[in-house]
Amino acid sequence: MSSGIDTLRLTAEEALALVDSGEVSSAELWQAYRDAINEHDGELHAFLTLVDEPEGNGIPIALKDVISTRGVRTTAASKILENYVPVFDATVAAKCRAAGMTLLGKTNTDEFAMGSSTENSAYGPTHNPWDLTRVPGGSGGGSAAAVSAGLAPWALGSDTGGSVKLPSAFCGNVGLRPTYGTVSRFGVVAFASSLDQVGPVTKNVRDNALLYRIISGRDENDSTTVDVPPVALPEGTDLKGLRIGLPRQLNEVEGIEPGVKAACEAALAKAEELGATVEECDLPLSVEYGLACYYLVAPAEASSNLARYDGVRYGLRSEGADFREMVMHTRHDGFGDEVKRRIMLGTYALSSGYYDAFYASAQKVRTVIKREHDALFERFDVLVSPTCATTAFPLGAKSQDPLAMYLTDVLTIPANMAGLPGLSIPCGLSEGLPVGLQIVGPQFSESTLYRLGHALEQAIGFDVVPERLR
Ligand code: GLN
């Protein structure tokens, strides 16, 4: 705060206005965030690598360490990429650079974005700014913690099964997992290519829309991308005509905390006051089979994507008597337990005798999930539920139990399997910890998600600054 800039409260939009008006220079702004990092990142560990000099004339940003940055170490929180310095920018990083943004650093994540708590990072976990004994969520816990604690005005994460939405919920941020295909993955360390999407993590909904505008659109280097019209910047709180569906299976999921349920119900009551209609509906197959389907598809694709780490092309190389042994030693030393578990699950699901039984069946189930959502979107504009059944859990609570960890994503995964966009906004506190509300819409409905998110944000008046930092 030496500069008089309150990084805890300043939104990116306000930061932009300060720089545009000349009130604060880009370098001063960057330094204010850098000072905040120096002060707080010792206890949070949101960053894996810090940039030493600001480059650009705009506002700062932090990027999840799965996004390649030219000249800046990119590790995916893995030992296997410990010393990897990309010679090119991921398209999303290049777009931020082209918009003048100054990079603060690269944020912590579960190794290769595999996890829900950031505890699978090879470099140690990130702590939740609301309660240092708890996880920030994952895999993009570093980006979420950084934004929440005022160490960056905004950040990018990546979301395969929920890694933008979940940490945003746990840290009290706004996080968007965009429609599959609207944001380039060129230069983003691949996890599960039919699911990976990069998305913005911000303090409020308008910032989120601003950043999504910058990163979205067709990229020649990623054939899955399409052109999208610039998303509308949300204004006002009128929700007349908006039809909200409440899938029972998501809203009454087993193990839902009473405080989470109460915060979501209060938010929905506000939506009704603002003119929206709210009606219960059903999403039985998507919720029953979504998670299992994800844990076949994602590890299968991961096992294929991770075959590139062979000690020859990237990063770490451990020696061995011959090529085979060298590769074996490299992977043994370079990959953590969760990554090895995923590779084993994936190669098993893809092996010749099992391919049809597992991977092919999972792809069929995926079509069923997509159709079930499509049918609901004939009656509803959006589907709403908690982002997670619980608030941030204590560090270590699930790290010895992979299945419990996987279950954390049971509410975010169904929409992801269907390629749909989802926005998580903070909707209140449960026992002092932020609760996330997930808003899912049909493909390319980001403007609608932002409209509802913004209206609720105004109506709820959630204070995004962690209580212990106020
Ligand atoms: N927690 C999920 C997993 O471990 C999702 C991670 C992600 O979205 N990157 O795969």
Image (cartoon, helix red, strand yellow):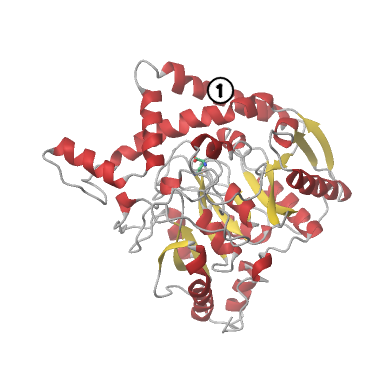
> Residue at left 66%, top 67%?
468
Which quadrant of the figure contains the N terminus?
bottom right
When the figure is inspected, residue 383 is found, relative to residue 423, above or below; the finding is above
Q: Nearer the viewer, residue 444 or 64?
A: 64
Q: Is residue 63 visible?
A: yes
Q: Is residue 85 left or right of residue 271?
A: left
Residue 255, quarter of the rendered image: top right
Q: Nearer the viewer, residue 2 or 197?
A: 2
Q: At x 57% / y 84%, what residue is drawn?
A: 3
Q: Amino acid at mark 1?
A: Val
Residue 195 placement, left or right of 470: left
Q: In this rendered view, identify the residue nearer to me: 372 or 354.
A: 354
Which residue is rendered at x = 63% and y = 44% of the image?
422
The answer to whether residue 217 is seen in the rendering is no
Q: Which residue is mark 1?
A: 365
Above or below, comparing residue 352 to residue 337 in the picture: above
Q: Give how far across and how far down residue 84 sits, in percent.
A: 30, 56
